[in-house]
Image: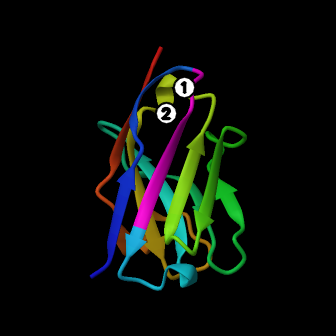
Amino acid sequence: QVQLVESGGGLVQAGGSLRLSCAASGLAFSTFSMGWFRQTVGKEREFVAVITWKSGSTYYADSVMGRFTISRDNAQNTVYLHMNSLKPEDTAVYYCAATPLFYIRSVREYPYWGQGTQVTVSS
């Protein structure tokens, strides 16, 4: 049915960059807002960024503002997370998620999730 597949994670030094991708299938991609979340050991999954289906507006967590950029290609059913100036505290498993709501940051409101991709930032 609905499938979200993340890719692009890896190991990078502090100050470096990575681009994560999430390919979606089984849903009307253009009518879903797409979010990125992350989770570290011992912590709950937290909001990182979202791009809305309604206008393509983008919103970010304070911790990544100015460093990360979320974008989407509706023709390819793909959402991206460009991560710059990475810090060790950005180390986490990053998850792609989809919601039919316009703009929401709550994990509980996203019914569809990818499997996650590991991002490790060394100091």
Task: Please state the horizontal and vertical placement of residue 54, each as a whole percent of the image.
Answer: 67, 81
Residue at position x 69%, y 43% from top? Answer: 65
Task: Please state the horizontal and vertical placement of residue 5, each as a whole percent of the image.
Answer: 34, 60
The residue singled out by tag 2 in the image is: 90
Towards the viewer: 41 or 37: 37
| Relative to 1, residue 86 above or below | above
**Occupied quadrant, residue 9:** top left
Residue at the extreme front of the image, as rendered: 75
Task: Please state the horizontal and vertical placement of residue 89, each as a whole percent of the image.
Answer: 49, 28
Q: How is the image coloured?
A: rainbow
Residue kind at label 2, given as amino acid type: Asp
Label 2: few (<14), some or many (≥20) within 10 Å? many
| Relative to 73, residue 16 above or below | above
Towards the viewer: 11 or 99: 11
Residue at position x 60%, y 64% from top? Answer: 72
Towards the viewer: 39 or 36: 36
Residue at the extreme top of the image, as rendered: 123
Label 1: few (<14), some or many (≥20) within 10 Å? many
The residue singled out by tag 1 in the image is: 87
Task: Please state the horizontal and vertical placement of residue 34, each as a whole percent of the image.
Answer: 53, 68
Predominant secondary structure, magenta span: strand
* In magenta segment, residue 22: yes
What is the CA distance from the residue labelled 1 to the residue labelled 2?
5 Å
Whether tag 1 and tag 2 are in contact, CB under 8 A, the answer is: yes
Q: Which residues are magenta?
A: 15-23
Residue at position x 34%, y 46% from top? Answer: 117
* In magenta segment, residue 76: no
Residue kind at label 1, given as amino acid type: Lys
Local SS, label 2: helix
Q: How many marks?
A: 2
Residue at position x 27%, y 82% from top? Answer: 1
